[in-house]
Amino acid sequence: MKKKLVLIEGIPGSGKSTFARFLSNQFERNGYSCGLFLETTLDHPIIESSGSEGISSFLESFYDRWVKFLDQLSDEEIVVLESAFFQSPIVHLLHKEADRELIRSLIYRVSNRLSIEDCRLIYFYQEDSQVAIEKMIDSRGGSDYLLRKHDEYKQEPYFLNRQEQGPDSHVSFFLEYSVLANEIVKQVSIPTEIIENSAAEYDLYQKQMLKKFDLRYFPDPVLEASLLMKYAGLYHNKEMDLKISVELLDDHLWIFGNKRMKPKSINQFYLDDMSVLIKFVINDSKVSGLVITEKDLYANRNDSGTVFEKIN
C-alpha cells in the first residue's frame, strides 16, 4: 500500500502552518486518521532543528530521515507536513552557503522517493517575491525582526560572507530562498498544486483543496460565550512556576498574548501556527485547569502534556 502524504510549502509567512492545520482538521472530521507535523513540532521526524549538521552530513541524513519516516508510516494514516520538504533543506543548506545545485539535487532525490507514494504538494508563492518578503518582515516586527534574525544566525557562512549588508542580508536570504523554491517546484516528480496567494483569499484556496481531496467541509464548533468565559482565567504550572493567561476578547479566547484559540471540540482548542492543543479540565462542572498537548518546541515537551492549574 502507498503511504498518504500532503506536503505544504512556500516562503515564510505565506500561511503554510494555518493551511496545514486546516487540512488536518478536515481530514479528521471526514473520518480519516491524520497526523500533523508543523515546523515547530518537537522531535520532528524530518526537520533537524539544531542547525548543527554540516553540508555533507545533512545531504545524507535528510534523505535518510525521509526513508525511515516513510518506512515506519502506517498505510492507514494521512500525514500533513509543512516546511519539511522545501523549507528545511533550503534554509539549512543556504545558511551553510552550500552549492545551489546540491540543494536542488537533494530535493529532487527526496521527490523521486516520494513519487512512489500517494503524495501531493501544495505550494504557495507570490509573483512579486520582494513585496511578499517585505510584508512578511513587517508582520513580524520589521527592523527589530531582522535584528533578531541577524543576532541568531550571523555566524552562519551565508551571513559571514555578506557582513557588509548587516541585518539586510536576511532580505537577500529570503529572496534567494524564494528564487530557489520557485525553480525547484517546477521540477519535482510528485503531483503539485501551485497557488499564487498574493490576494490572500484563503477561503477560496481551502475550497479548492477540499474539492481536490474530495472532502466535505466541517466548520469549527461554535461555543457559547458563557462557556468561553469559564475557560478564561490565570493558570499555573507548579513545576516550572510558570503562569499563563487565557483571555476572552471579542468572543474568542486568546493565549500567549496574541495567539487566538480555535475550538476543536467543546473543551479542546488548537492554534493555527504552533504544534499546540489546549484541553481544559472540568471537574464537577468547574474548570480546574488545562493541559497543553501536542509536543512543541516552545510550549510542551512532555508526552503526557504540560498541566496548568487554574488559580483565578
Image (cartoon, grey):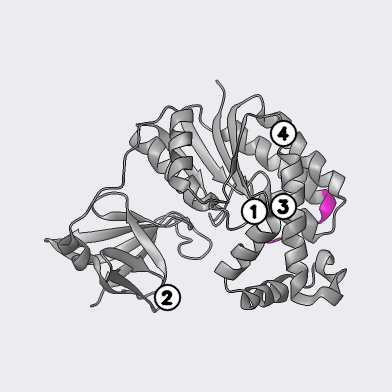
Q: Quadrant of residue 185?
A: top right
Mark positioned earlier in the residue sequence (2 or 4): 4
Q: Is residue 293 above or below residue 256?
A: above
Q: Is residue 224 left or right of residue 165?
A: left
Identify the residue under disc 4. 188
Disc 1 is placed on an element classified as loop
Q: Quadrant of residue 97?
A: bottom right
Q: Residue furthest left?
A: 284
Task: Please report the residue visible at 51 percent of the width from the left and 27 percent of the height from the top.
Answer: 75
Mark positioned earlier in the residue sequence (3 or 1): 1
Tell me if residue 37 is in the magenta stretch.
no
Disc 3 is placed on an element classified as helix
Q: Is residue 117 left or right of residue 63?
A: left
- Front tag of 2 and 4: 4
Instruction: Answer few, some or many: residues within 10 Å of disc 3's Cα (few below 14, many 20 plus, some between 14 and 19).
Output: many
Estimate the spatial distance between the alpha carbons at disc 2 and disc 4, rounded to whole Å: 45 Å
Q: Which residue type carries mark 4? A: Val
Q: Is residue 121 above or below residue 103?
A: above
Instruction: Answer few, some or many: residues within 10 Å of disc 1's Cα (few below 14, many 20 plus, some between 14 and 19).
Output: many
Q: Quadrant of the N terminus?
A: top right
Identify the residue under disc 3. 178
Q: Which of the numbered marks, if any, corresponds to residue 240?
A: 2
Closer to us: 221 or 289: 221
Estimate the spatial distance between the alpha carbons at disc 4 and disc 1, rounded to whole Å: 17 Å
Q: Which residue type carries mark 1? A: Ile
Identify the residue under disc 1. 11
- Front tag of 1 and 2: 1
Estimate the spatial distance between the alpha carbons at disc 3 and disc 4, rounded to whole Å: 16 Å
Q: Which residue type carries mark 3? A: Ser
